[in-house]
Amino acid sequence: MRIVALTGAGMSAESGVPTFRDAQTGLWARFDPQALATPEAFAADPARVWGWYRDRAAGVAAARPHAGHAGLARIARTHGLRVITQNVDDLHERAGSPEVVHLHGALFASRCSRCARPATPEPLRLPASPDAEGRVPPPACAYCGALVRPGVVWFGEALPAAAWEAALAAVREAELVLAIGSSGLVHPAASLPAIAAAAGAAVLEINPSPTPLTALASASWRCRAAEGVQRLAARLDAGERDPAALLAP
Ligand code: OAD
């Protein structure tokens, strides 16, 4: 069966990685994205931006994949599934999912802000000494001397073209698309479930809260990612292939 999992920040929540828009715990409830996640913010205060991404990287490095990540990797091995994620963490990879498509880049893929060469070894994993405000100057590119930046997509930037093309191709030929843990607010990633539905795929939303995707989903499971993925995996393992039975509450 051709299954595609579209994952957002809610996929990583049970691993302890904060989401963006959940009230109180969401990153954008506590931090100003314009001051931290735009090219202008990096140009204005690179040490502030780099220091903030160092903190996020430390949180991700300390996190462990949960049963939902493992469940998607198992479905990939046994039934066929591709992961397309808005997440910049590496939890899908560490759980064993092959060929993860990162629509918004990857935290541990820092690169030169001018020549775009990858920075190795990954500087976000190296020790550093933040100042009292958590600021850390980013390293200089070993080739051209410009500042190294995080390998993520910032507001106002285009998605990596190859990732977007791969995502489009995958959802257009999918039979079942899982929309897991995304608020469905950030485009163009948020348009993928609608593209899949228009191409004939069944869309299963797994999210404790309703989202703009709910209206177009074939079914919505109001549960957390780990529980929803394990439920689906059990049905697939039992040989269920009928979409209505697979997606029943
Ligand atoms: P959001 O923070 O906008 O939405 C997280 C979603 O996860 C919400 O709908 C929650 O209800 C849901 N959720 C919370 N806990 C969950 C759990 N345990 N299981 C399942 N779902 C859960 O995150 P995204 O939609 O991923 O972009 O955000 C999209 C983009 O906005 C991010 O990729 C990032 C951000 O700005 C960039 O950095 C470019």
Image (cartoon, helix red, strand yellow):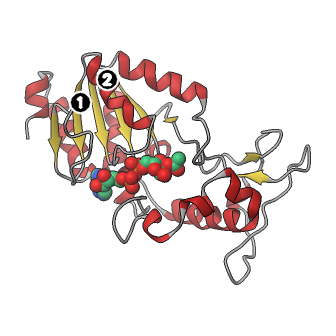
Residue beneath the point at 26% across and 23% down: 197
Q: Where is residue 71 in the image (x, y as percent from the top left)?
A: 31, 42
In this image, 171 relative to 139: left or right?
left
The residue pinned by badge 2 equals 196
Are the two marked residues, 2 and 1, in contact with CB atoms closer than 8 angstroms? yes
Q: Which amino acid does label 1 sit on?
A: Val
In this image, 176 relative to 32: left or right?
left
Can residue 88 be seen? Answer: no
Corner quadrant of residue 131: bottom right
Corner quadrant of residue 72: top left
Q: Is mark 2 on a helix, strand or loop?
A: helix
141 shown above or below 165: below
Mark 2 CB within 8 Å of ligand 1: no
Residue at mark 2 to residue at mark 1: CA–CA distance = 8 Å
The residue closer to the viewer here, 68 or 182, is 182
Q: Is mark 1 on a helix, strand or loop?
A: strand
Q: Which of marks 2 and 1 is nearer the N terminus?
A: 2
Q: Residues within 10 Å of mark 1 (few under 14, many from 20)?
A: many
In this image, 243 relative to 200: left or right?
left
The residue closer to the viewer here, 71 or 37, is 37
Quadrant containing the N terminus is top left
The residue closer to the viewer here, 101 or 92, is 101
Residue beneath the point at 44% across and 61% down: 17
Q: Position of residue 198 (x, y in %)?
A: 28, 19
Q: Residues within 10 Å of mark 2 (few under 14, many from 20)?
A: many
The residue pinned by badge 1 equals 203
